[in-house]
Image: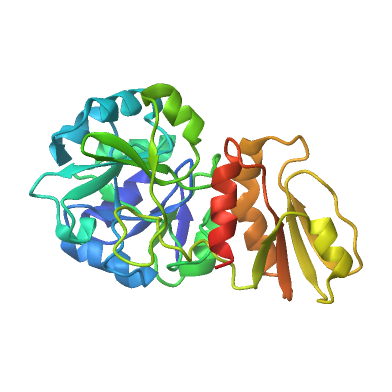
Amino acid sequence: MSIISNDISKAKAILEKEDLVAIPTETVYGLAGNAFSEKAIRKIFDTKKRPLFNPLIVHIHAVAVVSELAEDIPKKAYQLAQAFWPGSLTLVLKKKSHISNLVTAGKDTVAIRVPNHPLTLELLRSLSFPLVAPSANPFGSISPTRAAHVAGYFENTLPLILDGGNCTNGIESTIIGFENQEPVLYRLGAISLEEIEAVIGKVIIKNHKESAPEAPGMLLKHYAPKTRTILVDSVEDFIQYAETERIGVITFRQKISGTQIIHQEILSEQGDYKEAAANLYDAMHRLDTMKLNLIVAERFPEENLGKSINDRLTRATK
């Protein structure tokens, strides 16, 4: 059974033995291992049942470390790092030769970020190696935003879950890469496209993929509850004609009534996108334990973090 603790020294000792630890970040909990250990990297893929063609994100403690992992770094990458690190931004950059092809899925680029969580930053500063840390959940399932979510997935597998409380942003990092030195959005995330473009100008948007993605988090089916989930423009209209019983509902701010509704999750009664994003996965976890026949989610306005929330909900329904 996993130990749930905030003891960084225990986490450090486990990671130095090439084993895995779940770590908190401001986005979601990560399943972390030594980025320079092929044993630890393979254990991450095996534990998550993650396909080897899906690359991992390397977590570091400071912008200065980037040059140890990547080369030919575009000016706009440094501008983004200065603006958003530590924070929920991942940069995909040309990798240095010592970065394992297991980390990068054989590509010549590596995904890097500086997480914004005090426990994990302290842990990273204490280590002589960076950490690879995809979300601490079985591949394709709902990402964890609490230590308890991780324990529900891996309590008999992981020696330690480093408990840093609830994740404040609640959805994964935004991923930006560079093609011909121009910025490309690979994944919508906890930093909005509008915020990115305010720093570096127009960004090209890449579509999701079914295989061989350029970056983590680009697959079509992802972040999904076990319960069948659909995304609709109007939950109220859907419920009015739905014949299905035992329905769970996710809405932005509006209360919905209906005899079939067993439970409703309102993500932000104030209509705050950041609050809604922070609450999304926790709401999905709760609904997925209720033996529902269907989860019905409301489509968000296509603005700000509403785009990122819609992205997660869309891929939960594929």
Q: Residue placed at 68% from the left, 51% from the top? A: 299
Please determine whether, in this image, residue 252 is positioned above or below residue 262.
Answer: above
Report the side of 247 relative to 176 (left or right): right
- Residue at position x 19%, y 65% in the image: 39
Residue 1: % across, % down: 46, 69
Residue found at x 90% / y 63%: 258
- The foreground one among 312 and 277 is 312
- The answer to which quarter of the image holds residue 226 is bottom right
Left or right: 162 as drawn, with respect to 147: left
The percent coordinates of residue 151 (x first, y second) are: 51, 64
Please provide percent x and percent y for residue 233.
72, 54
Above or below for 88 versus 211: above
Viewer-closest of 160 and 195: 195
Residue 273: where, in percent of width, then height? 64, 37
Position of 296 relative to 93 (above/below)? below
Q: Is residue 93 above or below residue 262?
A: above
Q: Where the C terminus falls, by quadrant? A: bottom right
Give the residue at x 56% y 63%: 316
